[in-house]
Image (cartoon, rainbow, N blue to C red):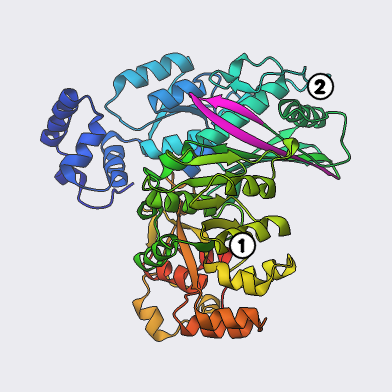
């Protein structure tokens, strides 16, 4: 294997290696890290140079995934702690040749330790530390715990009344179903998944996580009996009827992971192979930890969008509607807006389902349908508390919409969300609810629609040329192609092989003016509303997303997946 860049002798001579080892001894950092700092070359090139010098093979995440993990020799937790892994090569005989994957060939202590664990000769390979961690993430607790399960037929798990559980030690669970549920939730929270999907199959159950808005299959579990026990276990935790298997059920429970309280919303749905479950993960601390601080500047919108949004939230009264599909960041945007306008001189009250993050100095009310506290009832009570600004988590029905509109007309600033595909579909939603067009148009200050697009992985992103079909679909001409820096990720350990890492928001903003209000009151066709809005400077979601593509931050493929063209 020839390492890219400078020759091995020119780059990693004995003097350089000795210097790196001295620095590593003083800083207590790996020698590889010091070599990266001394040479200034890419970490992958460092690994390639060292592999050639020490005559070792290099493995990436894909090559590691082709092998079977030897967690019976080196447990998952210890592998994550030491940053190395033992594998069984698929080309080896039945007993399996043991492969030790390490990030630092100078770490002889780890190699001696791995050899003692294996009990047989170990064939060592080099890999990036990030690739090793990415491989281990593919075999988190929810996967390797299942492989050790004994699929036994048995009764449903015993009911437990505790609402707060701890997943600090998933091995304490005695039942296979309990162990699987615990480890799956623990793994999903650790991976920052927004949802867990457990889908019944003819032979068992499939476990999927929604990461950055896209489903990722993490395990296929065999055993119909085990699948039924897993669903029953979720029902027990969510206090649902385990005997009812023909109608949908919804519930919730709370867990504690690493000292953090996580709310889980459970939805059970009957299907042809039994029952499916979706568990939505609501991490109250995750919002602030993901963004550092809850301000509009921290949410990643472009300067033009932020200027328009600030103008809307600084209005003394009226209504701002934020729209978009579930998981598009609507509530986080409203949190950021409230944090900016929360000056201590105004009474701010929110009603949410659920309260996802606690805002200092803000009265926050959680919806409780079982106790009769709905959005509409709570909003009526809020108005008796003399608020200046109100946030309504979501407008779902006519009663809530009417109260919100009347609140905006009587001197309150109302921030709320509604489900619609874009800013213009909102008018159809309120018309369908039977809201008076005159009152709605008078109360409305503006509509903000947003989406979250996955952005290219910084490590493996590279330039590419879009296909003719993509160019035609988005009406790109020669001038566009000249100014676009098309890039996309090829897949690496940092991005779990997807080519994307993280997400960024794009927005479509409609500011109401007298001309638009007249068209709304007269119930003019949406086509006329669009013509006036675009003439007055409204950008579509597709236009906003194309700006990210032009800067090489995302791809046309991702744009097509998330937004609507035209």
Point 30% across, 40% down: residue: 47
- Report x, y in % for residue 440: 62, 69
Point 63% across, 25% down: residue: 182
> Which of 178/23 is in front?
178
> Which of 549/52 is in front?
549
For the residue carrying disc 2, how many other residues have a C-alpha within 10 Å: few (<14), some (14-19), or many (20+)?
Answer: some
> Which of 323/281 is in front?
323
What range of the chain is rendered magenta?
A: 253-271
Residue 30 - label: none
- Report x, y in % for residue 30: 26, 29
Q: Which residue is mark 1?
A: 405
Callout 2: helix, strand or loop?
Answer: loop
Q: Is residue 158 left or right of residue 470?
A: right
Residue 156 - label: 2
> Which of labels 2 and 1 is toward the front?
1
Point 76% across, 18% down: residue: 159
For the residue carrying disc 1, how many other residues have a C-alpha within 10 Å: few (<14), some (14-19), or many (20+)?
Answer: many
- Report x, y in % for residue 177: 72, 24
Residue 170 sits above or below residue 47 on the image: above
Residue 32 sits above or below residue 257 on the image: below
Q: Is residue 442 left or right of residue 503?
A: right
> Does residue 397 show up magenta in the picture?
no
């Amino acid at each position: 294997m020839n390492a890219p860049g400078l020759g091995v002798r020119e780059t990693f001579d004995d003097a350089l290696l000795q210097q790196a080892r001295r620095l590593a001894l003083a800083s207590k950092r790996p020698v590889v890290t010091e070599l990266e700092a001394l040479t200034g070359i890419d970490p992958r090139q460092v690994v390639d140079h060292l592999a050639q010098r020490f005559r070792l093979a290099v493995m990436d995440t894909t090559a590691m995934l082709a092998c079977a993990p030897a967690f019976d020799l080196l447990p998952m937790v210890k592998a994550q702690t030491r940053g190395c892994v033992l594998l069984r090569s698929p080309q080896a005989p039945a007993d399996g040749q043991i492969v030790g994957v390490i990030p630092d060939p100078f770490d002889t202590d780890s190699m001696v330790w791995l050899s003692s664990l294996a009990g047989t000769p170990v064939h060592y390979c080099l890999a990036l530390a990030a690739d090793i961690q990415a491989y281990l993430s593919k075999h988190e607790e929810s996967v390797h715990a299942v492989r050790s399960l004994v699929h036994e037929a048995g009764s449903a798990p015993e009911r437990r009344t505790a609402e707060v559980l701890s997943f600090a030690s998933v091995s304490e669970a005695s039942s296979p179903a309990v162990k699987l549920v615990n480890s799956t939730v623990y793994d999903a929270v650790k991976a920052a998944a927004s949802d867990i999907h457990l889908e019944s199959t003819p032979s068992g159950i499939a476990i999927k996580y929604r990461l950055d808005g896209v489903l990722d299959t993490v395990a296929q579990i065999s055993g119909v009996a085990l699948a039924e026990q897993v669903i029953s276990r979720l029902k027990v935790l969510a206090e649902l009827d385990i005997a009812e298997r023909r109608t949908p059920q919804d519930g919730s429970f709370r867990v504690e992971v690493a000292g953090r309280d996580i709310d889980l919303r459970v939805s059970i749905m009957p299907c042809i192979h039994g029952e499916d479950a979706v568990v939505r993960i609501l991490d109250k601390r995750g919002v602030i930890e993901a963004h550092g601080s809850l301000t509009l500047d921290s949410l990643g919108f472009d300067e033009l969008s932020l200027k328009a949004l600030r103008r809307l939230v600084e209005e003394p009264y009226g209504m701002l509607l934020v729209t978009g599909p579930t998981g598009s960041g609507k509530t986080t945007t409203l949190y950021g807006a409230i944090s900016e306008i929360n000056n201590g001189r105004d009474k701010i009250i929110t009603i949410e389902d659920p309260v996802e993050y606690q805002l200092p100095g803000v009265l926050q009310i959680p919806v409780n349908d079982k106790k009769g506290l709905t959005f509409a009832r709570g909003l009526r009570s809020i108005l008796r508390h003399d608020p200046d600004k109100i946030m309504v988590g979501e407008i779902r029905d006519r009663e809530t919409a009417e109260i919100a509109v009347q609140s905006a007309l009587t001197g309150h600033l109302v921030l709320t969300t509604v489900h619609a595909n874009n800013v213009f579909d909102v008018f159809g939603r309120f018309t369908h609810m039977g809201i008076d067009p005159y009152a709605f148009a008078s109360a409305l200050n503006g509509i903000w629609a947003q989406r979250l697009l996955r952005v290219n992985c910084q490590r493996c992103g590279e330039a590419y040329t879009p296909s003719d079909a993509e160019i035609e679909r988005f009406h790109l001409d020669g001038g566009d192609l000249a100014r676009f820096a098309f890039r996309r990720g090829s897949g690496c350990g940092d991005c779990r092989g997807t080519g994307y890492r993280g997400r960024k928001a794009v927005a479509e903003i409609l500011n109401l003016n007298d001309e638009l209000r007249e068209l709304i009151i007269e119930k003019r066709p949406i086509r006329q509303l669009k013509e006036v809005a675009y003439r007055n400077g409204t950008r579509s979601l597709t236009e906003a997303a194309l700006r990210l593509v032009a800067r090489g931050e995302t791809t046309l493929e991702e744009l097509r997946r998330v937004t609507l063209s035209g």
